[in-house]
Amino acid sequence: MPPSYLTPEGHQKLLEELDYLRTTKRQEVADRLGEAMDGGEFIEDAEYEAAKNEQAFIEGRIQELSTLLANTRIIENTGKHDVIQIAAKVIIQEDNNDPEVYTIVGPVEADPRAGRISNESPLGRALIDHKEGDVVSVEAPDGSFTVRILKVE
């Protein structure tokens, strides 16, 4: 499995989620299962089925997070970059549109609405290894477009 790139904040967030699932959420579901089983005919009980499904989801998420965190490479923005790399903050402009600000992150932390784009997205992939002033062609599913890199931090 290739490494997962995470910022220190993203890494901490996933560690906290994993801890919450292993401790609090696991116990909540175990309690729900116990209550459903105390109700008698638990095999046909909808609450029991719902709790079992939630337990399976939680265990799957715990496994997913454990695997992800085991293959994590933590990246930090160390300030000004000569070229765009993961963790860089970039200001780009497409044609005469308003400038847009993005931080390049790994796919796990990507949230385009929050200005965090994946290094594996068409735009992220196109920007990597370019520098301020470059005009970059982006091959996207809806067609290609160009952006000018105004600033790299």
Image (tube, rainbow, N blue to C red):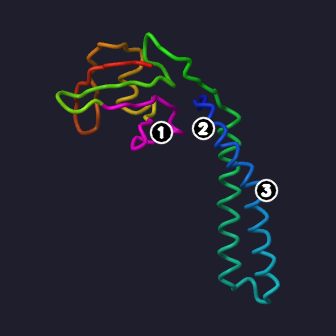
Question: On the rendered image, what quadrant is the N terminus found in?
Answer: top right
Of label 1 and label 2, which has the lower sequence position?
2
**Which residue is labeled 1 in the image?**
110
Please name the amino acid that badge 1 sits on. Answer: Ala
Q: Separation of disc 2 and disc 3 at Cα?
A: 20 Å
Residue span colored magenta: 100-116
Instruction: State whether residue 59 is above or below residue 3.
Output: below
Q: Amino acid at mark 3?
A: Thr
Q: Amino acid at mark 2?
A: Gly
Q: Please tell me how crowded label 2 is: few (under 14), some (14-19), or many (20+) other residues with Cα within 10 Å.
A: some
Determine the secondary structure under disc 1: loop
Residue beneath the point at 53% across and 39% down = 109
Identity of the residue drawn at 37% across and 22% down: 127
Q: Earlier in the sequence, mark 1 or mark 3?
A: 3
x then y, percent, for residue 21? 72, 55
Q: Is residue 61 left or right of residue 42?
A: left
Task: Look at the numbered disc 2 and give the secondary structure of its residue.
Answer: helix
Residue 10, numbered circle: 2
| Residue wearing tag 3 | 23
